Amino acid sequence: MAEKITPRNQDYSRWYTEVIQQAQLADYAPVRGCMVVRPYGFALWENVKDALDRRFKATGHENAYFPLFIPMSFIQKEAQHVEGFSPQLAVVTHGGGKELDEPLVVRPTSETVIGHMYSQWIQSYRDLPVLINQWGNVVRWELRTRLFLRTMEFLWQEGHTAHATAEEAEEETRRMLGVYADFAVNEAAIPVIPGRKSESEKFAGADHSYSIEAMMGDMRALQAGTSHNLGQNFAKSFEIKYLDRNNELQYCWTTSWGLSWRIVGAIIMVHGDDQGLVLPPRLAPVQVVAVPIWKTDEEKQTVLAATETVKAALGDGVRLKVDDRDEYSPGWKFNEWELRGVPLRIEIGPRDVAQGQVMFARRNRPGRAGKSSVPLAGLAGAVIDALRLIQNEMLQSATEFRDANTRETNDYESFKEAVAQGFARAWWCGRIECEDKVKEETKATTRCIPFDQPGGSGRCVVCGESASEVAIFARAY
């Protein structure tokens, strides 16, 4: 099956699309820019969702749901917001065969409708903070789309909170970016750079925006999650007020933060190879596939009995798939499960049964390098250890790849070379003129101003003026 996949170094974009379709993650929908998520892809998204949801609830957030349709007047209340989203809005003008009195926007994000509800729910400082998350879909009328990375309709979560003070709102904004970073590193095995977005790259209507940035397998950047401090902008537009302890009326401070199924695209591009997907064990829909191997009916009975022993030993401790299909050869099965990125394959043949062992094949180390014989005694522990090792090695490999393709540059010529081949870390004065010049001449953008700063000052890599911060620049999806 993997022979049909275009090699990454030949056409990375084509490789990406073919892997998604052949691994049965998703397919194109009949509506332009939309996609159908197949069961295997949705199982991966569900594991992403569950891992994030646990983290949200552990930090005191509750799930709720708000309408898909938003009155146009709500979108227009916040000037920066409507300006930022106008080109992407899908608008309903007719319903039930009649023209609507007011057009309805299919939500591109929910700050406005949630702000309206918060204005009704929040009366006193005793009602604060409000910590709500929503799992749902949004629609943005994208012109250029790509499976998982940029689609007109996509699934995501969006958190929306209200606070009594600016300090609490900023703390919340940073906390949730930290939650995203923790998820990316420890669940998706993706090293990320957390930092502040530039003024030109921040969310429409926010005071400050923060993001986690990741390097893909083609050295381009992907914004994997964002968190926004909205200040009092939406509170003032929607009259979200509370009586403080002195019985004085104050505007709330609000935040929003979101992560979408583009993280699935990130997992594919960070870890995948020319054979297909390589999925991190903590998120993989199938963590272990057991493939019994036989030639005769007698061998079949013996091997299948041993396979049942393996299945019983692993129990509910791992997500196990037993592939005992008669109609496919073992080699065909190996290729299929490699294509679908299953972290660990257990091969069980007659010789293995006779020797009281099984063969492990680790997906992150193709060929003989990833194969080892393991005794049946203590198999469950060996599987858990192998999955943990695979998870750690995937993170280490992705981190080494990113670091090897990140350069610190001090002059504009070497800077242009760096962003053509990966990430560039460089001093930046913060002026939009320098940002625009970089974008025009290199197609790179400021990904973020990392929290991890060297201190001191330097010279802007573009204009040579004094600069107090280092930024990450890269071409991005």
Image: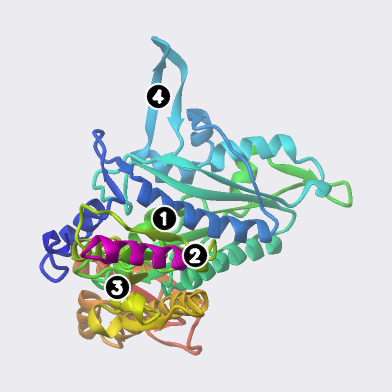
- Residue linked to disc 2: 318
| Label 3 crowd bin: few (<14), some (14–19), many (20+), radius 10 Å | many
User: Which mark is first along the chain, 2 or 3?
Assistant: 2
* Element class at badge 3: helix
Q: Position of residue 300 (x, y in %)?
A: 29, 62
Quarter where residue 405 is shown: bottom left
- Residue linked to disc 4: 92
**Callout 4 amino acid:** Val
Q: Position of residue 416 (x, y in %)?
A: 21, 78
User: Which mark is first along the chain, 1 or 2?
Assistant: 1
**Callout 2 amino acid:** Val
- Residue linked to disc 1: 44
Q: CA distance from mark 3 to mark 2?
A: 24 Å
**Callout 1 amino acid:** Leu
Residue 350's disc is 3
* Element class at badge 2: loop
Magenta region: which residues? 293-310
Q: CA distance from mark 1 to mark 3?
A: 33 Å
Q: Is residue 327 left or right of residue 222?
A: left
